[in-house]
Amino acid sequence: MVHTVVVDGIATITLDSQVNRNALSRQLLSELHDGIDLAEAGNARAIVLRHEGPAFCAGADLKERSATPADSRPFVHALERLMDTERPTIAAVDGAVRAGGIGLMAACDLVVVHESTTFALTEVRIGVAAAIISVPILRRVPAGKIAAAMLTGERFDAAEARSIGLVTHVTADVAATVAELCGGIRAGAPRAVTETKRMLRLVPTLPRDEAFESMRELSDELFAGPDAAKGMAAFAEKRTAVWD
């Protein structure tokens, strides 16, 4: 259900359970965790989460959920891992996204969607709430801007998703945009990229003075480090830095 390859420092994890529109079954989530394990073991510079078929992810596997006791912990852990891994994560979305699939997408650092993509948070229409996925979603989107979608289950388009901050890129060519982003990540020093991802998560949670002090320490450490010496030398010599 999930295929993972690591090529040129980029781990590509592909959801391929087309029979149920890549629904979040126990097996798919288990294989997703295996894919993240492979990406981390292979020291990938970035993780791209993409899909086969006309849907990125339809959300929970409702047939499985109705037949077995609820246990959302594997899904929660998958979201946490996508958010917390040191590597930038990129969702590459070229099809419809519904319910829990929006949470999976929102857990990634960058979200690239085709301009024809549609979204819907349909949980209330089957008697539940978008509870777990509210955590990554509401870290990206102000509550008031997504309240109508959550309360009504109404469909919205890529332009709306971009305007509220749910996605970062809307494009006519998802693969090309993702490739450009991966190239940009590879152009940065590995530790600098890792610290930038951590900074983006951490700084908004800190009081102002604590944030300045923490970031001052980080800045001084990085400027004194070997990557900065290599990068500034390359800049002075008008060449591209090559990172280990």
Image: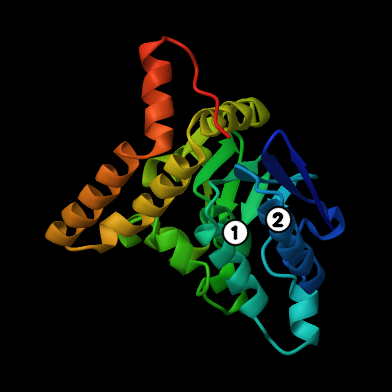
Assess disc 1: are there few (<14), some (14-19) or many (≥20) residues with their C-alpha within 10 Å of its C-alpha: many
Which color mode does the image show?
A: rainbow
At x 51% / y 61%, what residue is drawn?
Answer: 84
Q: Which residue is mark 2?
A: 41
User: Residue at the left extreme?
Assistant: 209
Q: Is residue 154 in view from this perspective?
A: no
**Label 1 SS:** helix
Q: Nearer the viewer, residue 184 or 235?
A: 235
Q: Quadrant of the C terminus?
A: top right
Residue under numbered circle 1:
104
Label at residue 225: none
Task: Say which label, 1 or 2, has the lower sequence index.
Answer: 2
Q: Is residue 16 left or right of residue 150?
A: right
The picture quadrant where one finds residue 137 is: bottom left
- Residue at position x 71%, y 49% in the image: 42
The one of 78 and 151 positioned closer to us in this rendering: 78
Quick check: 49 left or right of 168?
right
Q: Position of residue 40 (x, y in %)?
A: 66, 55
In the image, residue 177 above or below residue 150: above
Q: Amino acid at mark 1?
A: Leu
Q: Residue furthest bottom?
A: 69
Give percent across and percent down for residue 188: 48, 32
Looking at the rendered structure, the secondary structure element under dot 2 is helix
Rendered location of residue 126, percent (x, y): 62, 75
Amino acid carrying mark 2 in the image? Ala
Viewer can see residue 164 = yes
Residue 66 falls left or right of residue 191: right
Give the CA distance from mark 1 to mark 2: 22 Å
Picture layout, residue 63 above or below residue 169: below
